[in-house]
Amino acid sequence: MGVNFLSRTAFAVILGATLATPHTAFAFEPTGNPVADAFLTSLEAGYATKVSVESVAVAGEEVVMKGISADYSAKGDKRVFSIGSASLSDAALQADGSITSSSMALTNLSFLLDGDMVKVDVGAFKGLRIPSPEEIKNPSKAIEKPPFYREMEFTGITMSAEDEADVPIERFASTLNPIGDDGSIKASLDVEGILIDPNSVEDKDFAKQMAEMGYDSLNLSIKGAGMWSAADGKAALEDFEISGKDMGALHISTTLLGLTPEVLAQFQEAESDFGKLTGLLQMISIVDLNIHFRNDTMVDRILDMQAKEAGTDRAGLVDQLSGAMPNILALLQNPGLQEKIQNAAVAFLNQPGTFTVSANPAQPVPFGQIVGVAMIAPQTIPDMLAVEIQANQ
């Protein structure tokens, strides 16, 4: 989808994270206000070549900054972040250089990355903690500290790219709530009203297919909830959902073990060292995985469209697909899995309702073991993970 919808959506996340990016030497003129200077230092931390603010004022318990700009351009890439105004309430500079604030209100945010732009009308944080430069330089040190915010919400978001129509997003919200004092956390994500015009994407075949299925526009939403425990390294994606109006919804949940603070720090240190990364994968295990798709009308529309192209009706197309399935699935070289897939797929094609793929091994399986098996006998992985496939359950 052109600038790639996923990369655009990531910009919205970057807007929230930009307040906590890593640090270098001063690239701005100090304002004399300790909170404002610490705030600008946090923006500077992402290797900004220039950081500036037009004005700083104190109004009661608020520090109000206007006309904030940070230039991260490098190696020919133009990257500029700006904020029309930022008001921090009850802000305090801590001994370690971090800032705490009960809330922060933002207006007119923008993030430019070459020809791509994200704009936000209004942003708000509650329970804000902007980390110190040292903490930002070493992210592993932030694990046992309070989260960067308790609540975050952006509204009136517009993502744009050269030669493409704008993609508006109604709302982007997130929560980070600590569990105890060791860094354990519960988190949520809610993105509503992602509106995409199929005619605006570069792939004209995609626009044509959407029109044939009766989609003049796409209205998508993303939701997620999860938790992480520092004590045992348990990370649970309780439910991640991507849904589309008059389309359907994809739900993903999974539980992993072994993601302790020490392991996460080692991942950071390993960076691109394949040998170290492979060894670390042995320390992380999958407990379960569930992928569930609930059809609204999308599958029906796809089947009707393909049946028309094939010069038959939907029943005839389903018969053709069902008949071809055994030969296609034989490539998997796993008779048990082949039978599960065929039974579920045929049932789903005849009555598009729900389709579920789940993995619930008797014992947690290390990712290193999965990688090893994939190199020797990949067809046995579904059995190792106790994969089940069901339709309309």
Image (spheres, rainbow, N blue to C red):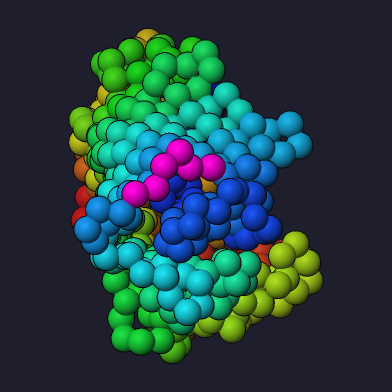
**Which is nearer the eye, 32 or 343?**
32
Coordinates of residue 106 in the picture (x, y in percent): 32, 44
Coordinates of residue 72 in the picture (x, y in percent): 63, 42
**Vertical comparison of 50 with 314: above or below:** below
Coordinates of residue 70 in the picture (x, y in percent): 55, 42
Q: How many marks?
A: 0
Quarter holding the C terminus? Answer: bottom left
Q: Which quadrant of the figure has residue 100?
A: bottom left
Q: Which quadrant of the figure has residue 174?
A: bottom left
- Range shown magenta: 52-57
Quick check: is 20 in the magenta stretch? Answer: no
**Residue shown at 71% from the left, 65% from the top:** 271
Residue 95: tell me if it is visible: yes
Left or right, 293 with respect to 199, comes to left
Q: Which quadrant of the figure has residue 273?
A: bottom right
**Which is nearer the eye, 124 or 153?**
124
Kindly report the secondary structure that dominates the magenta region of the rendered protein: strand
